[in-house]
Amino acid sequence: MLLICLAVFLNYMGVFTHLLEKDYYSEFSYPLDVDLQPLVKDLLVGQVPPTKPINVFNYNYLKPCEKKCANNSSPTILFVVKSALHNFKQREAIRQTWGYQNRFSDVEIRRVFLLGTGTDPEIQLEIDLEDGVHHDIVQADFHDDYRNNTLKTMSGFKWAVDNCPSARFVLFSDDDMYISTKNVLRFIRNPLNYPVEEPITSIDKGREHRERSLKQESLADDVAHLASDEGDSAVGSYVFHSPPQRHKPSKWYVSLDEYPYHLWPPYVTAGAYVVSREALLNLHYGSYYTKYFQFDDIFLALVALKVNISPVHCKEFYFWKKTYSKLGYRDVIASHGYGNPDELRSVWNEQKSAGHA
Ligand SMILES: *[C@@H]1O[C@H](CO)[C@@H](O)[C@H](O)[C@H]1NC(C)=O
Ligand SMILES: *[C@@H]1O[C@H](CO)[C@@H](O)[C@H](O)[C@H]1NC(C)=O
């Protein structure tokens, strides 16, 4: 009797399932099992690839926000914020803090919020009004629910590729994050060594550039040398290397049928991550040939693996709430846990005054 109880308990905890897992390193494959890179290349140049896509986002955009990057603008950074329908106050706080588009006179910043649709016409009316004022809502007609987060992420990638492909970097984030706009720009300038400043002499940009960056502490200059890194397919954030949850009651439980391996591909925290333009395109078109997966962080990781992008780890993207202190937030790029708009404003204002946001 005791043994049976023990067996039932262990099964419930997913112990046996772990034993049945396949080895990630030697056995990994995930549909569609084809070489993605030539197919993605075809899509990038507007040709029809020989293999049919299996996973295309084809919901309509009720609010396409198509003028966001009009007038030949080429933003250095585009903020794409996954938001929930009723989070009006959080969106307002983000507009006034880290999502403020005119934060720097010499760095173009753009911001949109991603929404699905709901059933309450009054909320929709408010969203219509909100968009009429701010012109920053991208709304697609799938049901807005956290379990549809992968759809929301796909809606954002497609939107950015179609409507703002000139953006050099895109930061995808949730609407309960603290983000330091300034540190995001520092990060994209030197993602592998953040937060250590690159010594000026190692910037191989000639004397003119050195003198300019010494003279004026201009973010535009910092960012300008990124342009020369054109072609880099990069994704940066906190990178996890962890096993799937086989513990049945877990919110993140996943069956062997859905995913049989003992490890996930390296994945970035979905709360905030930065992708370069190249990576945006590769991930977007790569997703056409990657079977839908319900967790957006894992889905992205699967696509990234298939298009050969290894995410860059940076611990200054906090997927939990980093305890606040004025100095302790100097290098923080993103921290989770700012669903309270007043708290976001006060932290952001203090960091901005201190020169860290
Ligand atoms: C584009 O330019 C027009 C005319 O100058 C202006 O009214 C409009 O606001 C600009 N749009 C954006 C997105 O900057
Ligand atoms: C996700 O969106 C689709 C399309 O609107 C909908 O059919 C489905 O019920 C949604 N899923 C959840 C969990 O809300």
Image: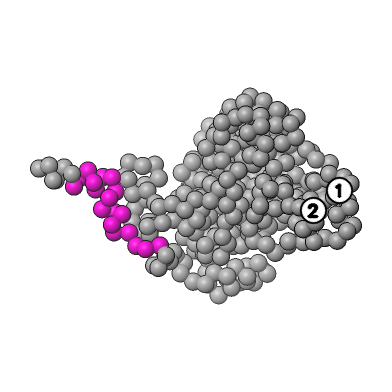
| Region in magenta | 7-24
Q: Horizontally, is 251 left or right of 153 in the view? A: left
For numbered disc 2, what is the local secondary structure?
A: helix
- Residue tagged by mark 1? 214
Reading the chain from its start, which is encountered first: label 2 or label 1? 2
Q: Quadrant of the N terminus?
A: top left
Q: Quadrant of the C terminus?
A: top right
Which residue lies at the image location 72% right of the left edge and 54% below the top edge?
168
Task: Let me know if residue 320 is in the magenta part.
Answer: no
Residue that protrudes farthest toward the left in the picture? 1
Q: How is the image coloured?
A: one colour
- Residue tagged by mark 2? 200
In the rendered image, residue 274, in percent from the top left (x then y), is placed at: 63, 50
For mark 2, does the 10 Å Cα neighbourhood hold few (<14), some (14 to 19), or many (20 or more) residues?
A: few
Chief secondary structure of the magenta portion: helix
For numbered disc 1, what is the local secondary structure?
A: helix
Q: Nearer the viewer, residue 90 or 184?
A: 184
Mark 2 touching mark 1, by CB under 8 A? yes
Q: Nearer the viewer, residue 291 or 261?
A: 261
